[in-house]
């Protein structure tokens, strides 16, 4: 007889999906008397499928405890319907990880129990961190921050070099990539930015009109809406939306390329990552961002204009005629300039975190989150910087 | 030699107790049709396949012949266009219910380990998610499976990203076996392993098959694995199973695909194994 067939007697049980926990197949223990003294008969199916049915484990644990309380006894496993590794593990753990003094088992059951016994070892413990290691980790954290800054600086430097290369040989540039990214970053973002801009305009107009009416200064709504939307809210709103929408996409795209070894494949072929991955995205973002800002600002102004007409009775024609007088054109140039910087930063931060992704899915998720959080924070920081530097211009 | 019937006579050992059991996997009248670019591509046409208890069935076929699709249909991950797939007496579609890990284990080609979990957490996952067994018992059960697939306990707390290809396959196998399912499916079990690891993995699978009385269905291109492990070979070609028989009889079956697959240069080399072929059911 071939070696494996001797287990057939053991596995003669029907292995279909158990439909309902039946009494007969429930794992259980009954106390009997045998010529050698009291004896515990193990009955039913001691399998993973059976033991994990609702309520079964509690019953097994309770009866094991109850039998242990009644004093020592021999064990008889011969009437078992089926025993698998989990069932054997339960019994072995109950026996205190050693063979009981008196036991009747079939050869196959003994083999199963022996395998469990052979491998029953304690797991290697998690070593808790010592105080020194925690101190060292603090240093690592600082180094990580400088490492990020260094990487980002290198990315900016590489972008400069790539731009010089592009200017020298514009025909060899990855123009298809650039136009593709402009479409995905810019064109497809138009509906959502318009909607958000419009609603923000409405909300802002409603809020300020209440206050202005108190002073009888209704006509100044043109100044307030014009200045705040064109100079600040338009660019920041567009940048935050695009950072969430396209910054995360850039990180995820490049990160997946790391996970699937596409980045390594590019390197092996001698294709520069900066020129083919980072520069097209940065260029597209720098071009698309001012346009999206303009679009968002216009829809916010339309929203504000509509609300001003409804609440204060200021007609759109009055609004449009007075806007150039209330807001200097330099504000528009400032907003456009800011947007180019925002766009470049969002693209660079997205690429930076994408290239740092390690080849596993968890790192991909962390990288994407970090990318969005960082780019939104940086956008607002840079916006504050612009506000301080250009405080004398356009107001 | 006349073509063998698709269901070749059972060998003696399998005939004795196994015949009274219902088949583990039963596929009848299966059609798989895919719509790509406006064209219907028929991958399987009225395909029938039965896997009896205790068999190690290797499914072979050319690229795009739908071997992996068949495996996914057995798992209930894909629904066939027509026909029925019955696994352990139930339709494959209901396999994914709670406690599925106690019915079918699957070894995915690239392991499909959860990269956020440690090795031990990966192995214990199916058991732990049922939330009815105590933690220390689950840990013992996972450690047992970890060692059964030939890994040292010191790897228990490693992350999947720190493991080599062979170790990933072993951990994935341990995870598939955590609830001792009667049916194990393998997708290219030795692909991507070096010859030594592949041999070791084959030996491991064979000993587990002996010890646990598993039924195994595998898709493989590796002729060494095929001859070393399988008790039957099912060849998918011309949109159906053209032959399903022990390896020796399959080789003798006259069909151009079988001729190219087994009797090419690679096949000749692997066939050397057949001479010392030790393993039949």
Image (cartoon, helix red, strand yellow):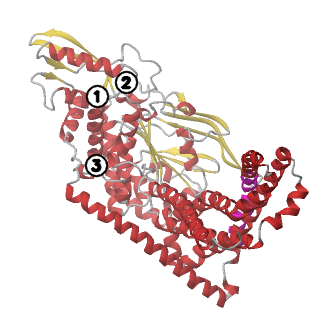
User: How far, Cα to Cα, is label 3 from label 2?
Assistant: 27 Å
Q: Residues within 10 Å of mark 1 (few under 14, many from 20)?
A: many
Helix, strand or loop status at disc 3: loop
Place of residue A94 in the rendered image (x, y in percent of width and height, measured from the top left): 19, 26
User: How far, Cα to Cα, is label 1 from label 3?
Assistant: 22 Å
Residue identifier under label 2: A50
- Do the residues indicated by labels 1 and 3 lie within the same chain of the protein? no
Q: Relative to A390, is A242 above or below?
A: above
Place of residue B207 in the rendered image (x, y in percent of width and height, measured from the top left): 30, 45
- Residue depth check, mark 3 versus mark 2: number of the one nearer the observer: 3
Q: Nearer the viewer, residue B243 or A137?
A: A137
Q: Please identify the quarter of the rendering in which residue B13 is found.
A: top left
Residue identifier under label 1: A87
Helix, strand or loop status at disc 2: helix
Place of residue A47 in the rendered image (x, y in percent of width and height, measured from the top left): 34, 27
Contact (Cβ within 8 Å) of mark 3 with mark 2: no
Which mark sits nearer the N-terminus, 1 or 2? 2
- Residue depth check, mark 1 versus mark 3: number of the one nearer the observer: 3
Q: Please identify the quarter of the rendering in which residue A184 is found.
A: bottom right
- Do the residues indicated by labels 3 and 2 lie within the same chain of the protein? no
- Callout 3: chain: B
Q: Nearer the viewer, residue A222 or A9?
A: A222
Going by the image, does A128 lie left or right of A185? left
Q: Nearer the viewer, residue A159 or B265?
A: A159
Q: Please identify the quarter of the rendering in which residue A83 is found.
A: top left
Which residues make up the magenta segment? A179-198
Residue shown at 70% from the left, 77% from the top = A175
Residue shown at 82% from the left, 49% from the top = A308
Magenta run includes residue A187: yes
């Amino acid at each position: 007889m071939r070696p494996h067939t001797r287990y057939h007697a053991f596995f003669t049980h029907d292995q279909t999906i158990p439909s309902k926990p039946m009494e007969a197949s429930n794992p259980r223990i009954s106390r009997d008397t045998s010529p050698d003294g009291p004896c515990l008969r193990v009955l039913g199916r001691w399998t993973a499928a059976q033991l994990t049915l609702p309520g079964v484990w509690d019953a097994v644990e309770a009866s094991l405890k109850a039998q242990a309380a009644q004093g020592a006894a021999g064990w008889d496993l011969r009437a078992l319907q089926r025993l698998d590794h989990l069932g054997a593990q339960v019994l072995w753990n109950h026996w205190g990880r050693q063979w009981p003094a008196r036991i009747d088992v079939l050869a196959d059951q003994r083999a199963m129990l022996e395998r469990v016994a052979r491998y029953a070892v304690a797991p290697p413990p998690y070593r808790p961190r010592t105080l020194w290691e925690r101190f060292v980790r603090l240093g690592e954290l600082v180094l990580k921050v400088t490492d990020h800054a260094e990487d980002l600086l290198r990315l900016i430097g590489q972008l400069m070099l790539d731009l010089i290369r592009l200017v020298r040989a514009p025909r060899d540039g990855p123009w298809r990539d650039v136009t593709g990214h402009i479409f995905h970053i810019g064109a497809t973002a138009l509906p959502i930015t318009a909607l958000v801009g419009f609603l923000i305009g409405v909300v802002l107009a409603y809020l300020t009109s209440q206050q202005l009416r108190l002073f009888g200064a209704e006509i100044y709504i043109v100044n307030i809406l014009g200045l705040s939307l064109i100079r600040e809210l338009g660019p920041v709103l567009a940048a935050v939306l695009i950072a969430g929408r396209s910054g995360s996409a850039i990180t995820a795209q490049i990160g997946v390329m790391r996970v699937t070894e596409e980045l390594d494949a590019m390197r092996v072929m001698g294709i520069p990552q900066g020129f083919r991955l980072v520069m097209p995205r940065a260029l597209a973002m720098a071009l698309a961002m001012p346009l999206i800002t303009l679009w968002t600002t216009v829809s916010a102004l339309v929203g504000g204009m509509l609300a001003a007409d409804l609440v204060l009775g200021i007609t759109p024609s009055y609004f449009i005629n007075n806007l150039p007088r209330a807001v200097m054109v330099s504000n528009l140039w400032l907003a456009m300039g800011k947007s180019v910087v925002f766009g470049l930063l969002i693209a660079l931060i997205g690429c930076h975190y994408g290239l740092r992704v390690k080849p596993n899915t968890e790192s991909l998720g962390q990288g994407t989150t970090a990318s969005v959080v960082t780019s939104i924070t940086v956008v607002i920081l840079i916006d504050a910087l612009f506000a301080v530097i250009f405080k004398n211009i356009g107001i | 030699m006349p073509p063998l019937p698709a269901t070749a006579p059972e060998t003696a050992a399998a005939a004795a107790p196994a015949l009274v059991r219902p088949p583990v996997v039963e596929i009848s009248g299966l059609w798989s049709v895919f719509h790509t670019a406006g064209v219907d591509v028929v991958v399987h046409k009225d395909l029938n396949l039965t896997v009896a208890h205790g068999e190690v069935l290797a499914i072979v076929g050319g690229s795009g012949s739908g071997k992996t699709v068949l495996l996914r249909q057995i798992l209930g991950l894909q629904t066939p266009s027509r026909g029925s797939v019955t696994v352990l007496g139930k339709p494959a579609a209901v396999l994914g219910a709670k406690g599925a890990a106690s019915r079918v284990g699957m070894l995915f080609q690239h392991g499909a380990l959860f990269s956020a979990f440690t090795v031990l957490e990966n192995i214990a996952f199916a058991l732990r998610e049922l939330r009815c067994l105590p933690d220390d018992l689950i840990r013992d059960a996972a450690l047992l499976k970890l060692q059964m697939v030939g890994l040292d306990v010191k790897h228990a707390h490693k992350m999947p990203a720190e493991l080599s290809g062979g170790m990933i396959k072993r951990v994935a196998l341990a995870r598939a076996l955590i609830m001792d399912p009667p049916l194990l499916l393998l997708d290219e079990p030795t692909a991507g392993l070096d010859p030594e690891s592949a041999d070791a993995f084959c030996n491991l699978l064979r000993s587990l098959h002996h010890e646990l009385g598993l039924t195994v269905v595998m898709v493989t291109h590796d002729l060494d694995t095929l001859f070393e492990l399988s008790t039957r070979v099912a060849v998918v070609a011309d949109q159906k199973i053209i032959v399903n028989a022990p390896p020796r009889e399959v080789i003798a079956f006259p069909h151009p695909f079988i001729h190219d697959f087994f009797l090419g240069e690679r096949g000749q080399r692997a066939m050397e194994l057949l001479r010392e072929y030790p393993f039949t059911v």
